[in-house]
């Protein structure tokens, strides 16, 4: 519903509404107000170590950018474009995108009265900030460094004929062109009112622009943005590009596990994330593993430090501090009741050996972890029997789902080593 509305018109969603929406989504994800992992990390893709959670702000940005791209694309013919097109004629779009003042200011509203378009341009500038492409080019229009009586300049005839940068005002010898010469050079109609504005403009230019030697950087902000949205044919591609530039790999939790499990080799994190995710189609198992990857499983040690419970001792053995490593690996109750002789790194993150890993083995290990986790919460002791029952329930559920989705072969391929007479 929201997407539909945003596709039709580039609506600007109010910051308050957006904040509420995002809060609801994350509360739903965590099941409480307490968010244990940074939102930018959760919005990263599965293979990067996130949860593939939608970044609503970037999604709306992508929708707006797509609309803007259509507006600029001459091959897209539509009646609605006639409303906006006059305001984006010639170089004006560049002038707006290179602005260093807020586009919501009154002086901009005068030259660009269309609210929707202005908001979209604000989104574009927001995107540039996300991409961290700050331009240092000496642009002339809507530049806060060039003000006369606290107002910036926006001279339409000059902009339309391509006068955009400080260097355009100069002769080959580095002196300022006269207004008439500039009109000849850039082919615009000279007039008296504009002439006075021009004199004001030149007199307002920052002094150091004359004294410093300066080489313009290769690209302006507007060029960065136009390159960014060029050749992107769908909202999804724009969204993915945006996400790639903002989503954060969970370096902190990777470091944590490296130290905790004494990993002395290059951990293939991408494989770990993607193989565990693909080892099952059960969402509860997948989200449990993502929490484990991100060290976001809550144990008594943390609950005790927050004053939520009286003791930080392990639910199973009652004689050591309970943390993730203890519950899943070093606790003697876990070790005797779930007798798996694997190194801790494999118990917690599966067996990979390069490539896509063994789906069934990784699924079984994941189930074992999940049973331990469930038992901890229900204050039961983990047993092999519970594990076998749970594994079977996962298998039955995957069987139903795969039949429904029409990929029963994949199910058989994964489970064939455990299937004897059935099927
Ligand atoms: Zn214990």
Image: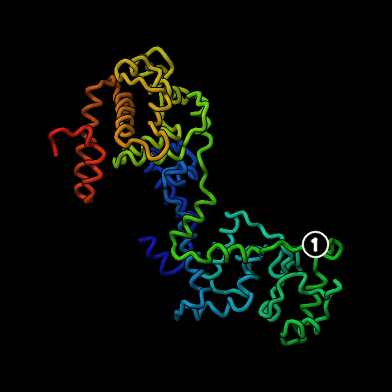
113 or 224, which lies in front?
224
Q: Is residue 394 left or right of residue 195?
A: left
Question: Where residue 176 appears, x then y in whole percent?
Answer: 84, 75
Position above or below: 42 against 253 = below
Q: Is residue 45 left or right of residue 197?
A: left
> For the point 39% across and 38% down, which residue is it?
32
Q: Quadrant of residue 375?
A: top left
Q: Residue furthest top?
A: 319
Q: Secondary structure at mark 1?
A: loop
> For the point 57% across and 80% down, which residue is it?
86
Question: Where residue 383 appears, x then y in whole percent?
Answer: 26, 20
57 or 212, which lies in front?
212
Any atom of ligand 1 within 8 Å of the CB at mark 1? Answer: no
In the rendered image, the quadrant that contains the N terminus is bottom left
Quadrant of ligand 1: it is top left
Res. 31 visible in picture: no
- The residue singled out by tag 1 in the image is 214
């Amino acid at each position: 519903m929201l997407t539909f509305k945003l596709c039709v018109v580039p609506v600007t969603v109010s910051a308050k509404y957006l904040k509420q929406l995002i809060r609801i989504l994350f509360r739903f994800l965590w099941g409480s107000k307490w968010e244990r992992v940074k939102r930018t990390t959760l919005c990263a893709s599965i293979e990067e170590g996130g949860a593939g959670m939608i970044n609503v702000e970037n999604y709306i940005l992508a929708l707006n950018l797509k609309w803007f791209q259509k507006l600029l694309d001459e091959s897209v013919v539509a009646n609605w474009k006639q409303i906006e097109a006059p305001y984006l004629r010639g170089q004006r779009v560049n002038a707006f995108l290179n602005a260093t003042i807020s586009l919501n200011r009154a002086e901009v509203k005068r030259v660009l009265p269309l609210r929707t378009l202005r908001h979209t341009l604000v989104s574009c500038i927001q995107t540039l900030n996300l991409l961290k492409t700050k331009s240092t080019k000496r642009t002339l229009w809507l530049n806060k460094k060039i003000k006369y009586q606290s107002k910036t300049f926006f001279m339409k005839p000059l902009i339309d004929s391509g006068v955009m940068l400080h260097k355009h005002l100069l002769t080959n010898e580095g002196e300022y062109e006269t207004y008439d010469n500039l009109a000849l050079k850039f082919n615009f109609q000279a007039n008296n009112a504009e002439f006075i504005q021009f004199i004001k403009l030149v007199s307002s230019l920052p002094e150091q622009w004359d004294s410093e030697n300066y080489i313009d950087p290769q690209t302006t902000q507007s060029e960065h943005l136009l390159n960014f949205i060029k050749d992107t044919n769908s909202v999804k591609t724009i969204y993915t590009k945006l996400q790639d530039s903002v989503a954060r790999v969970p370096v902190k939790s990777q470091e944590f596990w490296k130290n905790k499990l004494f990993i002395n080799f290059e951990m293939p994190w991408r494989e770990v994330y993607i193989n565990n995710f693909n080892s099952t189609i059960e969402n509860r198992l997948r989200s449990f593993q993502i929490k484990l990857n991100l060290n976001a499983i809550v144990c008594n040690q943390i609950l005790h430090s927050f004053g939520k419970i009286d003791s930080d001792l392990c639910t199973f053995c009652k004689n050591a501090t309970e943390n993730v490593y203890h519950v899943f690996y070093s606790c003697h109750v876990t070790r005797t009741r779930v007798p798996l002789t694997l190194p801790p790194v494999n118990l917690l993150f599966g067996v990979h050996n390069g490539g896509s890993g063994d789906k069934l083995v990784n699924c079984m290990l994941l189930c074992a972890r999940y049973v331990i986790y469930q038992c901890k919460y229900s204050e039961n002791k983990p047993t092999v029997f519970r594990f076998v029952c749970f594994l079977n329930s996962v298998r039955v559920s995957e069987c139903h789902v795969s039949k429904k989705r029409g990929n029963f072969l994949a199910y058989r391929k994964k489970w064939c080593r455990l299937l004897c007479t059935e099927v």
